[in-house]
Image (tube, rainbow, N blue to C red):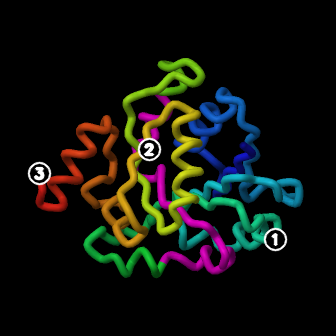
Amino acid sequence: MHVTMVGEGGLTGALTALTALAVRAGHAVSSIDDFVKNVTSNGLSDILIVTGDPAAIASLIRRVSSSVGVDTVVVDATTRLTGDRYEDPDAVASDSAWMAELPNARLVRAFASVPTDAFGLLTVQSEPGEATELAIPMAGDDAAAKGVVAEFMRQIGLEPFDLGPLTVSYIMEPGGPLWGLAVDEIDMRECVGWLSGDG
């Protein structure tokens, strides 16, 4: 796959580790931040991973929007820095100005809720293609798009955990019950079961 990582203020933390994992698994990876001027060569990306404060990245997304193909899966890995809590799902929508720049995006929410250190540990603890026990929650309305992201996760050694539609992604936001969790699939199932009243 060709994967493009986009973020404002430089790509750090989790995306640095995700880039290392993706390259190690044989994927082509491009990084675009405020300092990259020419983005036209990134039009063939299979996955576009967007990170940063969603309220601040609309102009950067505007620069890359013309090079995003109709089949590109956009992964929303943004993190609100405003302190809004997960109990307000409308707050998630208020930060979606950058999404307006990609009106036909096949959107999946993933990666942002997992601590940066968890991804960093994988780069030194596992071999290319070796499965780990780290479950990565994701949400989306496009089943095929989630399938692409799930396959990418497996290829880089992560275990995808499908939460369902985008409307439930607020539980992965700062202050939400899945925020900051680095757990295996069993613990993730227990946590999600507890949230739904089944645990």
Disc number placed over residue 199 in the picture, else none? 3
Residue 115: percent from left, percent from top: 40, 43
Which portion, as a residue range, is magenta? 95-121
How busy is the neighbourhood of tag 1: few (under 14 within 10 Å), some, or many (20 plus)?
Answer: some
Which residue type does callout 1 highlight?
Ser
- The picture quadrant where one finds residue 62 is bottom right
Which of marks 1 and 3 precedes in the sequence?
1
Estimate the spatial distance between the alpha carbons at disc 2 and disc 1, rounded to whole Å.
29 Å
Residue 171: percent from left, percent from top: 31, 62
Which of marks 3 and 2 precedes in the sequence?
2
SS for dot 2 = strand
Please report the residue visible at 56 percent of the width from the left and 59 percent of the height from the top: 144
The reply to whether dot 2 and dot 1 touch (C-beta < 8 Å) is no
Please report the residue visible at 73 percent of the width from the left and 59 percent of the height from the top: 34
Please report the residue visible at 58 percent of the width from the left and 39 percent of the height from the top: 18
Is 87 in the magenta?
Answer: no
Estimate the spatial distance between the alpha carbons at disc 3 and disc 1, rounded to whole Å.
45 Å
Which residue type does callout 3 highlight?
Gly
Name the residue tied to disc 1: 66
How busy is the neighbourhood of tag 2: few (under 14 within 10 Å), some, or many (20 plus)?
Answer: many
In the rendered view of the protein, which quadrant contains the N terminus? top right
